[in-house]
Amino acid sequence: MVSTTNAPSDYEFTIEHSPAYASLLVQLKANQKIVVEAGAMAAMDKHVQLQSKLRGGLGQSLMRMIAGESLFLSEFTAQQQAGQLYISPGVPGDIQHYYLEAGRALFLQSAAFVACAPTVELQTKFQGLAKGFFSGESFFLIKAVGHGDIWFSSYGAIVEIPIEGGYIIDTGYIVGFEDTLDYNVEVLGGLSLRGLGVAILGGEGLVCRFRGQGRAWIQSRELTNLLNFLQPYRPKGRN
């Protein structure tokens, strides 16, 4: 399956094999650059050159080390003539394109970033102890600022949810959201011992309550659920 986007873009690209094993094919114009997550390049033609770059300054590098993110990004340039680049995320799933307008920001889970224009700056944002601890996710988010194209990925298909007023999303399914949305993390059913017990025994957990107007993206599958399902089938060590 091949998908494109109706959003504006400075690149010619297609998203192939979506939503199960999506890969991003970019046709770079002569001297055009694209920034890619380290290790995500699958193939490229001979006209494309690679340069590894440190993500931001020392402060941001330390934040990324703590967050478990790569310290480096790969910058690909089509030298003198057009070139083709295949990009594949590490986890089987979908890829979403987003065009970031100047003065706005996009928040992503730390493992969701795939690629972006060099005019997009990636910052590591600390969620705070309460949000990070209670969400069961990373304490850190990626904050994309600047302007231009950005692509992000998920485990499973990506579903876009327009939000007007309020919406509740399980923390394990959130891929990204626009900066026009505010959120709080809470136990489904209310932050109380009874609510926590219902959440645990009922198989549900902690959720993000979004407020405002904007878009959020969720993944159709949750990796932790898969790992829990596979746990009984793991080989047991011999005594």
Image (cartoon, helix red, strand yellow):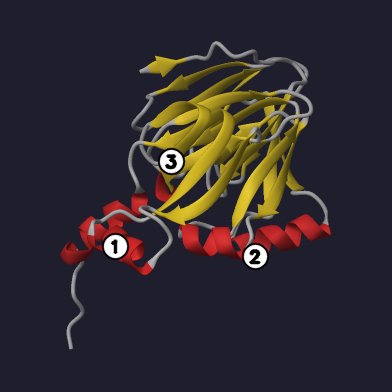
Q: Nearer the viewer, residue 57 or 27?
A: 57
Disc 3 residue type? Ile
Position of 228 with respect to 13 (left or right) is left
- Circle 2 is placed at which residue position? 66
| Quadrant that contains the N terminus | top left
Query: In the displayed structure, would residue 104 be above or below residue 54?
Result: above
Considering every residue shown, the one lying at the far right of the view is: 57
Camera-near label (3 vs 2) is: 3
Locate residue 78: give its quadrant.
top right
Position of 1 with respect to 154 (left or right) is left
Q: Residue at x 65, y 32 (%)?
A: 180
- Circle 3 is placed at which residue position? 168
Dot 2: element? helix
Locate residue 105: give its quadrant.
top right
Q: CA distance from mark 1 to mark 3?
A: 17 Å
Dot 3: element? strand
Dot 3 alpha-carbon crowd within 10 angstroms: few under 14, some 14 to 19, many 20 or more:
some
List x then y, in percent, for residue 168.
43, 41
Q: Looking at the rendered structure, which numbered label has been put on residue 163?
A: none
Disc 2 residue type? Ile
- Circle 1 is placed at which residue position? 200
Q: Residue at x 72, y 23 (%)?
A: 101
Query: In the displayed structure, would residue 128 be above or below residue 14?
Result: below
Residue 23 appears in the figure: no
Camera-near label (2 vs 1) is: 1
Disc 1 residue type? Ile
Dot 1: element? helix
Among numbered discs 2 and 1, the one appearing first in the sequence: 2
Q: Are marks 1 and 3 in contact (CB under 8 Å)?
A: no
